Image (tube, rainbow, N blue to C red):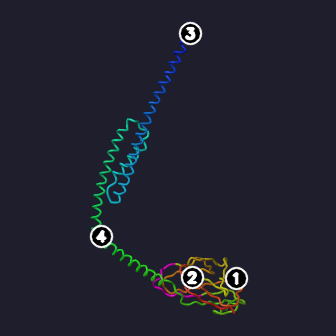
Amino acid sequence: MKEKKIIRILTITIIIVIGGLLFFIYKNNESEKIRVKQEIELDNVYVELDSVSIALGEKILTISQLGGDIDSLIILKESIEEEKKAFRTRAYAQINRLQGKVEGYKELLLAQDEEIERLKIVNEQLFEENKEQKIEINNLNSTISNINQSNKKLENKIKEASQLELKDIEIHGVFRNGTKKLNSFKNRSLNKLDINFILEENELSLIEVIGIYILIEKPNNEVLYDISKGSGSFTFEKREMFYTLKEEVLIDRNEKKVRVEYIKNEELKRGKYKVHLYTKNYKIGSGEFFIK
């Protein structure tokens, strides 16, 4: 009897457990169906909301190009984007409210179509009214452009006219005994070169201190170069040039006499030597001397 009682109790317990399990499975299936249905409805509303946001963006761009007021529409679009961001976290109870908002947004889009048509008409009227003004503005711009070109040409002419010009240049050979010879001399016992040049008076020159680069060019076209005696290089017309000496000169529009000496650092071979004078922007002139 005791065993039968135990079997009955176990049977009842198993039936209760199976019944509870079946009820749990049924409720879980029903919940899943509700969840799937909610997700489908949410997806549909989200797609509509996203479509409205894209359409509103296009309206904003069109109204902006037509000169209309878009501030309130931008705020509204930002609000829709915020709705989209938080959309997935909202409960099923909010679907009807969101669907109502979507319908309201659609009506707003239709109203913006009317505003766009109105702005198009206004812009067409303004276009007709401004045609003559645009022609006048184009003519004025053309005149201004011609004036600017003329001014640029005048500036270039003034700039060119303000350049320094070489009036005269003499190169003396100075020997160890103190004697001097002009423009043609022997290398033997030559101690240094005296370069004397005169710059023309120029009323258009700027009053300033400028650097004059002196290039002593040997018969083989190389430049006499000695860093210890002040030689170096400078950029002229986008290329590097080497100079023998550099002299700072105050230009005051009056005739200017300049004397520069170069102490010989190497034996000078026979032939014609050229002396070129440059500024950074242009060449002033040249002279020459001969080594016998």
Which mark is first along the chain, 3 or 2?
Answer: 3
**Amino acid at dot 4:** Lys
Name the quadrant of the N terminus.
top right
Instruction: From the image, state whether disc 4 or disc 2 is nearer to you.
Output: 4
For this orientation, the residue located farthest to the top is 1
Q: Are marks 3 and 1 in contact (CB under 8 Å)?
A: no
* Mark 3, residue position: 4
Report the residue at 37% width, 38% height from top: 95
**Amino acid at dot 2:** Tyr
Question: Label 3 vs label 1: CA separation?
Answer: 133 Å
Q: Which mark is residue 278?
A: 2
Report the residue at 29% width, 70% height from top: 131
Label 1 crowd bin: few (<14), some (14–19), many (20+), radius 10 Å: few
Q: Are marks 3 and 4 in contact (CB under 8 Å)?
A: no
Name the quadrant of the C terminus.
bottom right
Question: Label 4 vs label 1: CA separation?
Answer: 76 Å
* Residue 153 location (% of width, % of height): 43, 81
Instruction: From the image, state whether disc 3 or disc 4 is nearer to you.
Output: 3
* Mark 4, residue position: 131
Q: Secondary structure at mark 2?
A: strand
* Mark 1, residue position: 265
Which mark is first along the chain, 2 or 1?
Answer: 1
